[in-house]
Image (spheres, rainbow, N blue to C red):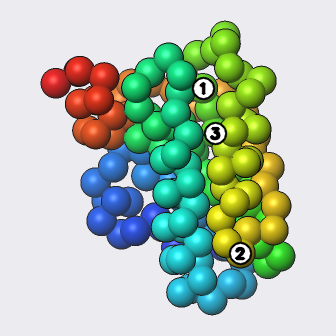
């Protein structure tokens, strides 16, 4: 797959949790629309123990969109022993699966690289009172 777009350019430059959106041969404007809508969907999923969404926490590492609009998401957890480890991928799949134009979603839990608080955006740090 080739890297055809980053999350909105300003976010990719400034956010420690900016992720790569990859798509094979979708038109750039479709990738841009899907990127924004998928980010919106990811921001609707919250870690139940931390008052911030998983996107702002930096738990999403990569999103691939294939020609059939199947989405594959590499994500992590704040800790391997996270009590919702078995549930959170389903929450992500449900949220992103509701995006118009997405034909299917698979969320994959990865632990490389390990998550650190450095991946959190300023918004997440403010939400949890780290400022």
**Residue drawn at 53 percent across, 27 percent down:** 47
Spatial CA span between label 3 and label 1? 7 Å
The residue to which callout 2 is attached is 101
In the shown orientation, is residue 42 left or right of residue 92?
left
Task: Give the SS element for disc 2.
Answer: loop
Image quarter of the N terminus: bottom right
From the viewer's perspective, is residue 29 above or below residue 105? below
Residue 127: x and y in percent read: 29, 29
**Residue drawn at 62 percent across, 32 percent down:** 76
Q: Is residue 66 visible?
A: no
Spatial CA span between label 1 and label 2? 27 Å
Image quarter of the C terminus: top left
Q: Nearer the viewer, residue 95 or 8?
A: 95
The residue to which callout 3 is attached is 75
- Would you call the spot at circle 1 few (<14 residues within 10 Å), some (14-19), or many (20 or more)? many
Q: Nearer the viewer, residue 50 or 19?
A: 50
**Residue drawn at 65 percent across, 65 percent down:** 99
In terms of sequence position, does the residue under pointer 3 or pointer 2 come before the other? 3
From the viewer's perspective, is residue 79 above or below residue 89? above
> Looking at the image, do the residues carrying marks 3 and 1 touch, with CB atoms under 8 Å apart?
yes
Quarter of the image for residue 104 reads bottom right
The residue to which callout 1 is attached is 77
């Amino acid at each position: 797959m080739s890297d055809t777009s980053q999350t909105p350019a300003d976010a990719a430059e400034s956010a420690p949790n900016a992720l790569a959106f990859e798509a094979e041969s979708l038109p750039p404007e479709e990738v841009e629309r899907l990127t924004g809508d998928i980010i919106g969907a990811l921001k609707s999923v919250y870690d139940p123990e931390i008052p911030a969404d998983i996107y702002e926490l930096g738990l999403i590492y990569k999103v691939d969109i294939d020609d059939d609009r199947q989405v594959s998401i590499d994500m992590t957890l704040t800790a391997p022993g996270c009590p919702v480890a078995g549930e959170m991928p389903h929450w992500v799949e449900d949220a992103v699966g509701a995006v118009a134009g997405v034909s299917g979603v698979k969320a994959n839990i990865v632990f490389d690289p390990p998550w650190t608080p450095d991946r959190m955006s300023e918004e997440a740090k403010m939400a949890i009172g780290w400022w």
